[in-house]
Image (cartoon, rainbow, N blue to C red):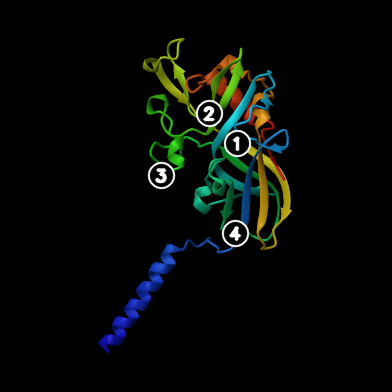
Amino acid sequence: MKHIVFFLLIVLGTCFISCKEKPIDDVRVPSLVLQFNELFEGADIAFDTMQYFSEAGNPFYITEIKYFISNICLYKGGQKIKISYQDGLHYVETNYPDTKKWNICQSLAKDNYDSIGFTFGLTDAINITNAFPNSPENSMTWPTILGGGYHYMMLNGKYLYNDTLYPMNIHLGRGQIYQSQTPNTDSIIGFIDNSFEVTLPYSFSFNGSTQTININMNVENWFKEPFVYDIAYWGSSIMQNQAAMQMLKENGTKNVFTIY
């Protein structure tokens, strides 16, 4: 009898552990697959090749693009459906092709959906220093003295100005409010969240089969609309320049992201 009781306790304990490890809304087959693409004028980025021009006429090339997407959600008839899988947060880096595809293994109601939304970057609530201790996300650390947390984006490369190559570090993250007119770290009195919301119309009917959605970053539009962003004017480093980051933020909400 003791052996039977002991056996039952083991079985129950194993069941409890296995059930506890698997989230209720976790499914084996992805409901959604988000494919992230980085494009320039409709074509895949050719990295490390001096063939691009910004709207201001800056010749440049791109070495890598890194960014965070968070608060992913779907909409149907005005109703918001949050993606809770992996906290609705994903990191994309062109150096790591596996990050460009996100399999969302979350149960999804069979219904008609009309759009998808997300935050580009990380809101203050989740943009916490040391939240991502492991590679490759930890390469996005934003200096503590400048507000801490993480970069929302690194668009890195080089630009040509007066026959000289300069680093092109288009970095977007927390901005600073300075007491003085010069960006002296000793005069920082506050910080600005430069993340922004994106909503993209996309109608689809989910019938239980995996739905693949392509989300495109149209890189030329970071420099184009509504503000012409002059890379040479703003220089190689903008992490302490809220005016430059604000311009990128507003351009980002316009036509940088499209979906198909």
Task: For marks 2 and 4, give the CA distance.
Answer: 31 Å
Residue 80 visible to an observer of this rendering: no
Q: Residue at x 39, y 70 (%)?
A: 16
Task: For marks 4 and 1, give the CA distance.
Answer: 25 Å
Residue position for label 2? 172
Q: Residue at x 55, y 44 (%)?
A: 71
Using a 10 Å C-alpha cutoff, classify the residue at mark 1 as few (fewer than 14 neighbours), some (14 to 19) or many (20 or more): some
Residue position for label 1? 197
Sequence-wise first label, 3 or 2 = 3
Residue position for label 3? 134
Q: Nearer the viewer, residue 94 or 229?
A: 94
**The disc labelled 3 sits on which kind of residue?**
Asn
Task: For marks 4 and 3, give the CA distance.
Answer: 25 Å
**Which structural element holds mark 2?**
strand
**Which structural element holds mark 3?**
loop
**Which structural element holds mark 1?**
strand
Q: Is residue 42 above or below residue 204?
A: above
Sequence-wise first label, 1 or 2 = 2
**The disc labelled 1 sits on which kind of residue?**
Glu
